[in-house]
Image (cartoon, helix red, strand yellow):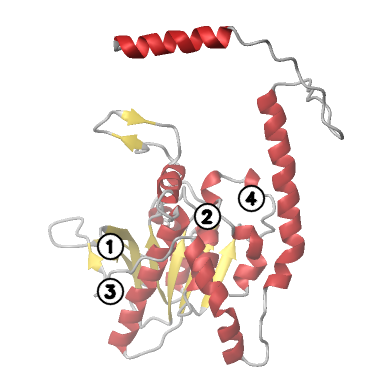
Amino acid sequence: MPIRAAKLLLIAMMSLSCLPRVQAADALPGTQPLTVDKPLDVFMIEGLDRYCLKEIEKARGARDSLWKRDYSSLEEYEKSIAPYREKFRTIIGAVDPRVPAKGLEFISSSIDSALVATAADGSYEVYSVRWPVLEGVTAEGLFLKPKAAPVARVIALPDADWTPEQIVGLAPGVDPASHFAAHLAAFGCEVLVPTLINRDDTFSGNSELNRFTNQTHREWVYRSAFEVGRHVIGYEVQKVMAAVDQFTVRNEADGKKLPIAVMGVSEGGLLALYSAAIDTRIDGAVVSGYFNQREGVWQEPIYRNVWGLLREFDDANIASL
């Protein structure tokens, strides 16, 4: 430290030591000294909890008054909910432009074939595929193609901890009743099953820095995406909408307007609900193991937290989109 700076610091310290001791002021009218019988951090968190729970309950009572739906006709209804649809798209971060669809890319598992399996009765085949989503982001999964002309096209969304192979019945770990992708294909639907970000923590970190955490993959992406106004939910909804892009291309190639639907279970149910709310090209949605009141979302995994969601949107309002 320079000599002059050291002298000034010494003078300042000596001056402070000469000041008279300040006695605690009397309490202001209508107040009293803070006295708590627990650590201040615990006291603070309890206060924050009370405030947030009160705000959640307040939002629940005020939410319906924020919606102005016009039921006079289907066309007017669509116009009236369009601003809510766009706001919902924004708060889940599904706003980036997607790469145009040009057809599914079949991933060869051997030298000459992307075929993974064939149904026992020969009614459909299973292929390994990928498709572009955003610049630098690609989705992949399984494509179930009926031997006969398809009757519909469905995006099947497993729970986050289920693989596409499990809901197709090609891998153990899921009750046969939940092989819904295979059931849909057996009934004549083309089915696309995306791989979802799971709840393991294998890749939650940076291998170059050799730094890892025990956050699940979904939480890892959630925390990083939050910094740039995005969300793990939004990214996976983009995967679904990119799958709708692919089915739209297939409809155009076939010269048919086959219905496009989504069906999901648990985390996949959330994505099915959210995707159908945003993308009007989706003709139907099946949501299993997710739809409920959301006032207890603070007790759910953090990667389901969407900033500002409960001010206007609970599951019923999302379904109305």
Q: Choose the circle earlier in sequence order: 4 or 1.
A: 1
- Relative image position of residue 245 (x, y in whole percent): 35, 75
In this image, 33 relative to 286: left or right?
Answer: right
Residue at the spot 25% in from the left edge and 74% down from the top edge: 103
Reading the image, the residue beneath label 3 is 101
Tell me the amino acid under the disc marked 1.
Arg
Q: Secondary structure at mark 4?
A: helix
What's the CA distance linking mark 4 and mark 3?
A: 35 Å
Tell me the amino acid under the disc marked 3.
Ala
What's the CA distance linking mark 2 and mark 3?
A: 25 Å
Q: Choose the circle earlier in sequence order: 2 or 4.
A: 2
Residue at the spot 31% in from the left edge and 9% down from the top edge: 3
Q: Nearer the viewer, mark 2 or mark 3?
A: 3
Q: Secondary structure at mark 2?
A: helix
Crowding around mark 3 (Cα neighbors within 10 Å: few <14, some 14 to 19, many 20+) is some
Q: Which mark is residue 267?
A: 2
Reading the image, the residue beneath label 1 is 130
Q: Which mark is residue 297?
A: 4
Q: Nearer the viewer, mark 2 or mark 4?
A: 4
Q: Choose the circle earlier in sequence order: 2 or 3.
A: 3
Q: Do residues under tags 2 and 3 come within 8 Å of each other at their CB atoms?
A: no
Is any part of residue 314 visible from this angle? no
Tell me the amino acid under the disc marked 4.
Val
Q: Nearer the viewer, residue 104 or 240?
A: 240
The quarter of the rendered structure image containing the C terminus is bottom right
What's the CA distance linking mark 1 and mark 3?
A: 11 Å
Crowding around mark 1 (Cα neighbors within 10 Å: few <14, some 14 to 19, many 20+) is many
